[in-house]
Amino acid sequence: MAISRSKWDSFIKCPLCFYLLEKHQIKPPGTPGHPINSRVDALLKEEFDELRAKGEPHPIFKEYELNFIPYNGLDPETLKKYRFNRVGVRARSKKTDIEIFGALDDLWLNKDTDEIVVLDYKATSNKKLEEYTSSDKHYHKSYLRQLDFYAYLLKLNDFKVHDTGYWLICNAQDESQKTFNKKVNFKTTLLSYKLKTDYIEDSLVDLKNCLESEKMPNSGDDCDNCRWYNEKKNKEN
Ligand code: SF4
């Protein structure tokens, strides 16, 4: 069985939604994609690839006094696979027979320690950028798990992984921009996070038990859809 990072995350967010989809092919209510965010991701990949080819740091590393460069120890084909949603970085879980995988935005190298740096690009537009690590928003918690999962995949592939991961946040909140004129200016910020990977194997054991059970699991606390439906049903009775 193969489980992607996003499926694993959906199990943690709500075992019931995961179970209904995986076992009974009942899809949750859909949400539209994020094409502008995807475009920012694609442009950032190009920007970092240019610097990777030259072995040069990105200006944001200097701004944050980090001795990093885009990691150039992979051949371009492997990096392409690592970034491709349906392939990604793959590994066998240690406590289950599940093959886990996830697609990365990029990898950086910490030149001081010779360790791989885990990261994700994020595009947003927020007047007050929140610190993801202390936020109680469920989607911010999911950002933390995302970096944890990438770090774990890389560790299982024998990479030496730096203990701190990063989000490169592109925030469309440049207040000096007054009119649109066919462009939006972004401010870039690096947020850091101490990675945790020790809970992942146990969560995969829970995920497997959930899938093998005939009993429907409870829904998670982070989604309003079922709560809305149950409250509506209670009112009708
Ligand atoms: S609570 Fe949300 S995520 Fe969970 S089953 Fe209901 S709709 Fe799906």
Image (cartoon, rainbow, N blue to C red):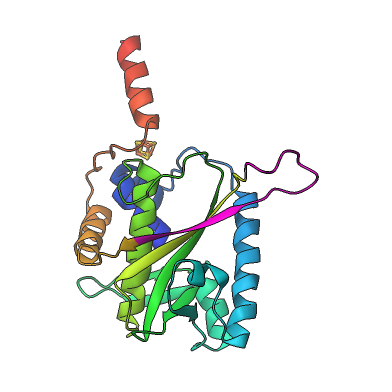
- Left or right relative to 222: residue 179: right
- Left or right relative to 98: residue 122: right
Say which residue appears at 53% left-offset and 84% top-offset. Answer: 78
Does the magenta run of residues contain 29?
no
Q: Position of residue 144 (x, y in %)?
A: 34, 56
Q: Is residue 223 above or below residue 3?
A: above
Of the pair 173 and 24, the residue shown nearer to us: 173
Say which residue appears at 43% left-offset and 48% top-offset. Answer: 25
Q: Is residue 2 above or below residue 184?
A: below
- Left or right relative to 131: residue 106: right
Q: Which residues are magenta?
A: 175-192
Magenta stretch, main secondary structure class: loop
Q: Is residue 223 above or below residue 58?
A: above
Which residue is farthest right? 181
Does the magenta run of residues contain 176?
yes
Say which residue appears at 60% left-offset and 70% top-offset. Answer: 45
Say which residue appears at 33% left-offset and 44% top-offset. Answer: 135
Q: Quadrant of the N terminus?
A: bottom left
Please say whether residue 63 is visible from this viewpoint: yes
Please say whether residue 10 is visible from this viewpoint: no
Q: Position of residue 201 (x, y in %)?
A: 22, 66
